[in-house]
Every structure is written in structure tokens, then in C-alpha cells.
Image: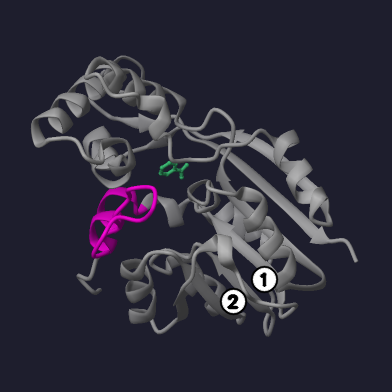
Amino acid sequence: MTTANDQAPNAAGQTWNPEAYARDAGFVPVLGSAVLDLLAPTRGERILDLGCGDGVLTARLAEAGADVVGVDASPGMIAAARERGLAAHVVDGHELAFEGEFDAVFSNAALHWMSRDPAAVVAGAARALKPGGRFVAEFGGHGNVAAIVTALIAALDAQGVDGATRMPWYFPAPDAYRRVLEAHGFRIETIDLIPRPTPLPTGMTGWLRTFADPFLKGLSDSDRETVLNRATGWLATSLCDEDGHWSADYVRLRFRAARGD
Ligand code: BEZ
């Protein structure tokens, strides 16, 4: 796999490094089987993988016989997806420019990052689909990583930084997201909020190293260290078991909707 990573942080302050992602968060595509089952891709279908990351799940869609295109805002992740031989392009999910060409739009563990204007993302997915096409996705729902978010905000506040203003993610409740989907012409087939505590192979340190950049942007090295140590210390109470195994308090929002025309 390539060693390329993003040259600069994105608008949320996040930098993606495919190798660190595979090491610290390789469980993300592994746990994507349920949403893949809900998608049920068939041979010859044209599918858009929205927020495809390094393309691990995109490759599974291709193996199922789909004609799949991956898009992601991270150049480093797209380079990694292309190394797998996938058709993949650097595109911000808020700015999808496809018109009526896909049988399905699929997304795993990505929509919560497209937090600037979730309605614009859903509008782009609707536009990209053929009439009757389906939008099937899983991402962080209401309450996702609540302990981690709260600990980071509290640790930043203790350092004199307004932590809440740095929250980079969109974790909607099912009713709220249903309204966004319906406002863009989708008919909801299923939408569920699913608590899924998730073991962290490289502990909370690995998770924070991979995902907490937006909370830490602009801090000095010593302030970063203080915030991370404080947050990790508080989190140990609820997310580290007696044997030192860490988990994250993931809550998934999983849905299947069809363009209702
Ligand atoms: C998630 O998959 O739920 C997630 C991953 C990284 C940061 C925030 C949420």
C-alpha cells in the first residue's frame, strides 16, 4: 500500500494517513458486513461508494460484480484506493456532481464526517441516483462516541479552549435523519440506531491519534499532550476493562432508502 498521506488537514482539521488508518481503525471495514448485506449488491449494478476511504469495502463491491466508483475528500485515501485498482476520485461529499447514473449510493462510516451541510450531501446522493435507485449507509448516530467527545471537550475546556466549538462530527437521531432524507425525495425502508461497543486494537491512544486531530488543531505540543492524557485518563473508567482492553462507545445509524420516483 502507498505511504502517501494528506499533505494538509481538511476543513475540519483532519489529516488522513492510510497506513495509520489501517493499523488503528482496520476494524471499520471489517464491521461493514451488515450494511453491505443491507445493500445487497448485484452483478453489473453501477454503485457509488461515498466516502470510500482506502477502498477496502469498495473492493468488496467490485468483487460482488458491481461497477463501482469510489469518492473521498482525502487525496491520501484515494491514492490508497487506486492502488487496489479501483476507480476512485477526490470529491468532497458536499459537492457530488453525478446526475442520475447510479443504481445505488453506498456509504460506510463516512457521512458523520460530512458535517458542514448534511442536507447538501443527501441532495447530491439523490441527484446521483437513477429513479428508484437506493441509498444505503451506516454512520455514527445520536450518542456515538459520546464519552470520547465529552472527555475531549472537558479536557480542552480545562486547558482554556472552547472544546464544544471544535466538534467535527454529525451524529443525528433516526427521526432527524429521516426528515433530511424525506425532504430530498427518499422513501425510507429501514432506519435504525444500533449501539455497538467496538474493541480498539491499538487502544484509546491509537483511536485518538487517528481521529482526534480536529479537536487538537492549533494547540502546542505540550497542550496536545495534556489534553490527550487527561481525556484518556477519564475514559479509562468507562471504556477500559479490568484486563486493559479498550473499546469505543460506537452507536451506528443504519438505513436503506429509495429515490421515491
Ligand atoms: C465512527 O465511525 O463512528 C467514527 C469514527 C471516527 C470518528 C468519529 C466517529
Q: Is residue 111 left or right of residue 221?
A: right
Residue positioned 63% across, 54% down in the render: 137
Q: Is mark 2 within 8 Å of ligand 1?
A: no
Colour scheme employed for the rendering of this structure = one colour
Circles 1 and 2, Cβ within 8 Å, touching? The answer is yes
Q: Nearer the viewer, residue 157 or 210?
A: 157
Q: Which residue in the structure is indicated by mark 2?
A: 64
Secondary structure under tag 1 reads loop
Compute the Cα span from label 1 to label 2.
7 Å
Range of magenta residues: 6-26
> In this rendering, does residue 19 appear at all?
yes
Q: Residue at x 62, y 49 (%)?
A: 118
Instruction: Please state if 250 lies on the left or on the right of 135 as rendered.
Output: left
**Could one spot residue 239 in this view of the protein?**
no
**Position of 118 relative to 220 (above/below):** below
| Residue 246 x %, y % | 30, 30
The crowd level at tag 1 (other Cα within 10 Å; few <14, some 14-19, many 20+) is: many
| Residue identified by numbered label 1 | 41
- Rendered location of residue 217, percent (x, y): 25, 41
| Quadrant of the image containing the N terminus | bottom left
| Amino acid of disc 1 | Pro
How many numbered marks appear?
2
